[in-house]
Image (cartoon, rainbow, N blue to C red):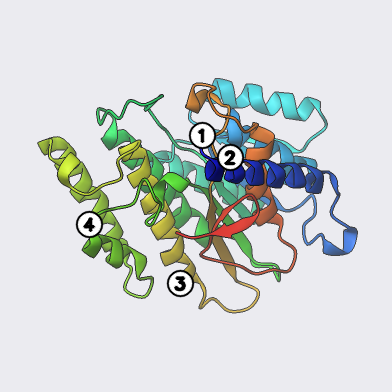
Amino acid sequence: MDHKKEKAKEKREKRRQEISLLRTIPYSDHRKWWSSDTVAVVTGANRGIGFEIAHQLASHGLTVVLTSRETGVGEEAVKVMQEGGLNVAFHQLDIVDHASVEAFSDWIKETYGGLDILINNAGVSFNVGTENSMEHAETVIQTNYFGTKNMTKAMIPLMRPSPSGGRIVSVSSRLGRLNGKKNRITNVTLRQQVEDVDSLSEELIDNTVKKFLEQVKEGTWESGGWPQVFTDYSVSKLAVNAYTRLMARILEDRPEGHKIYINCYCPGWVKTAMTGWSGHISPEDAADTAVWLALLPDQFVSGKFWAERREISF
C-alpha cells in the first residue's frame, strides 16, 4: 500500500474514532426537537445497518417503525428491541410492491397520523468480492432506486407538519459517485446532465437507469461508460443520489412548518450479511450518520451527500 493510501486510511480511522466518541455524548434537552411521539420509519431494518439505525433512533427515545419484507424476521428483530424497553413497532413492507407500499401508508396514517422521519435503508446487492455479474441488474435497480423512490413519494404526503421539518435519509454509497476516481461515469454528456441539479428531472434519472438495463440485456453495457466496479449496484446508488438532489430542489418551496429535508449518505464498507461480512466498519458506526442527519437539531441541510458526518461530493 502506498504512503498516500496509508495516510488516507489513518485519517478515516481517526475520524471514525472521533465519531464513536461523539456518539456517546447524549443530546442535551434543549437541542432535542423530538419526543416519544416522534415517528421514524426504517425500511429493511431486520438486520445489518437498518437494524442498527432503528436501534439507535429508538434509544434516543423516538417511536420507531421497523419494516422488512419477511414478517417473521422483522417481528424477531422488533422483539429484541422491545425486550430492551424500546418503543419499536413492526409492519411488513416490500418497497418494490405498490400494494405493499399502499397498505403500509394506510396503516401508518391510521396508527400514528403520519411520520416524521423516513430512513430509506432497504436495498440489495448480489456482487461479492471482485465479481461483477449483471445477472440481477434488474432486481438491483428496481429495489435500490425505484423502490426507494416509491417509498419516498408515498411518505412525503404523510410527513407530519412540524417546526423542525420532516427528515428523509437514504442509505447510498460512494460507489455511486459521479466523479469518483475509480467508478465515475465516463460518458461525459450523461455525467454533465446528471450533475446539473437545475436541469435534473425524474425522467432523466429514470431514462438513465433504463438505458443501463437495456444495455445489460443487449450485453453492451461494458462499453456504455458505466462504473466499472459493482456496476449495477453503483448505477442504482448513483440514481438514488441524483433523486435526492432533485427532491431537495422540489421540496425547498414548502412553507415554514411543512418543510422536509432530504439527504443521502454512504455508510462505508460494513461488516454485514450484504458484504459477506467482509467489511471493516461495524454496523453501529455505519448507522451513525443516518441517525445524526435524522436528528439534526437546527441545521437545516438538504440535498447533500454525507459520510462520517461530513459532506462529500456527488
Q: Which residue is mark 3?
A: 249
Q: Which residue is mark 2?
A: 6
Residue 44 x %, y %: 53, 35
Element type at mark 1: loop
Q: Which residue is mark 4?
A: 187
Q: Nearer the viewer, mark 4 or mark 2?
A: 2
Task: Please state the total of marks drawn on the protein image.
Answer: 4
Q: Nearer the viewer, mark 4 or mark 3?
A: 4
Q: CA distance from mark 1 to mark 4?
A: 30 Å
Q: Amino acid at mark 1?
A: Met
Q: Name the mark on residue 130.
A: none
Do callouts 3 and 1 mark residues in contact (Cβ within 8 Å)? no
Q: CA distance from mark 1 to mark 2?
A: 7 Å
One can see residue 46 in this view: no
> Relative to 301, is 231 on the left or the right?
left
Element type at mark 2: helix
Q: CA distance from mark 4 to mark 3?
A: 25 Å
Q: CA distance from mark 3 to mark 1?
A: 41 Å
Residue 11 x %, y %: 65, 46
Q: Amino acid at mark 4?
A: Asn
Q: CA distance from mark 4 to mark 2?
A: 31 Å
Label 2 vs 3, first from the N-terminus = 2
Q: Amino acid at mark 2?
A: Glu
Residue found farthest to the right = 29
Label 1 crowding class (10 Å Cα cut-off): few <14, some 14-19, many 20+? few
Do callouts 1 and 2 mark residues in contact (Cβ within 8 Å)? yes
Residue at image location 27% in from the left, 28% down from the top: 133
Q: Nearer the viewer, mark 2 or mark 3?
A: 2
Residue 50 x %, y %: 59, 36
Q: Which residue is mark 1?
A: 1
Label 4 vs 2, first from the N-terminus = 2
